[in-house]
Amino acid sequence: MSDIVIPKLKTNFSSHPLVNGDKGEVFANTQVWIFDLDNTLYPSEINLFAQIDKRMGLFISQELGVPLAYARHLQKSYYYQFGTTLAGLMKVYGTDPSKFLDFVHDIDLDCVREHPDLRRGIDALPGRKLIFTNGSRGHAERVALKLGVLELFEDICSIESCDFVPKPSHDAFLRMTNAHNVDPKSAAMFEDLPHNLEPAFELGMKTVLVMSHYMDHPAQKKIATWQELPGHVQFLTDDLAGFLNAGWAA
Ligand SMILES: [Mg+2]
């Protein structure tokens, strides 16, 4: 694998997903296909998450009565430290999670378009399909509906379902697997945040990193320095639909 060179950010490496194993072989026993939502099921380029990101800062500024710049600092600090901004706000300020989620997910979904190729790719996967998101159920439902894929999913494991314990904590993964009767060894996880794949891989899931151009988290920025895929990332693609629709043995 020493010949794998991860291109710099925004470099196009769509047609050849960087592979750390044989695709058909790796997923041969996969029965549950689990997808993150934001910047995974929809491409980061549509900038939907940028709206959520902005509203988180606004929420903190208004709720705590602090300048926006300081609110943004708190937002990112909590995100890096606790997994989500909400987890930090709940812990430090006792923030009402419903109020936060309603506010930050009150966004314009015009940029989300139907994605027939994505639908075809997900539909063709043999087995159960779940969405596992650190966002709210309502947000996941609205976005998946606009993409035209909602009905393909058996259920959504949202941040509410996990009692607001976010990925990448092991606890969040165990809550998800227990609630949905998932044997991690027969599951695959698709995610745009590489650190969220660590617990997935440790539990025995197959892992696919969907490259996001929304490089916000330090763990994402490190991708630019990778010389080869880390052990917990078995596949890397910047085109989820393309990945799902091609490269499977007959
Ligand atoms: Mg995501």
Image (cartoon, rainbow, N blue to C red):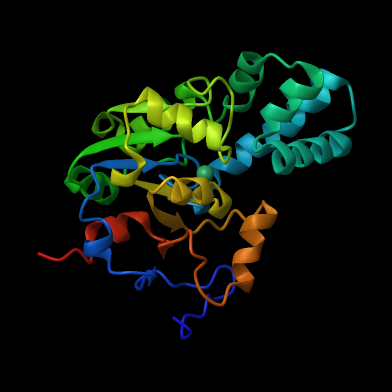
Classify 89 as above or below 231.
Answer: above
Q: Is residue 208 left or right of residue 73?
A: left
Residue 177 location, quadrant: top left
Classify 230 as above or below 82.
Answer: below
Q: Residue at x 36, y 41 (%)?
A: 184
Q: Nearer the viewer, residue 126 or 67?
A: 126
Q: Is residue 99 left or right of residue 174?
A: right
Q: Nearer the viewer, residue 22 or 95?
A: 22
Q: Residue at x 37, y 69 (%)?
A: 17
- Image quarter where the N terminus lies is bottom left
- Image quarter where the C terminus lies is bottom left
In the rendering, at what x and y percent does residue 13 appear?
44, 72
Classify 175 as above or below 1.
Answer: above
Residue 103 location, quadrant: top right
In the rendering, at what x and y percent does residue 206 appear?
36, 53
Q: Residue furthest left?
A: 250
Q: Is residue 124 left or right of residue 55?
A: left
Q: Residue at x 48, y 64 (%)?
A: 231
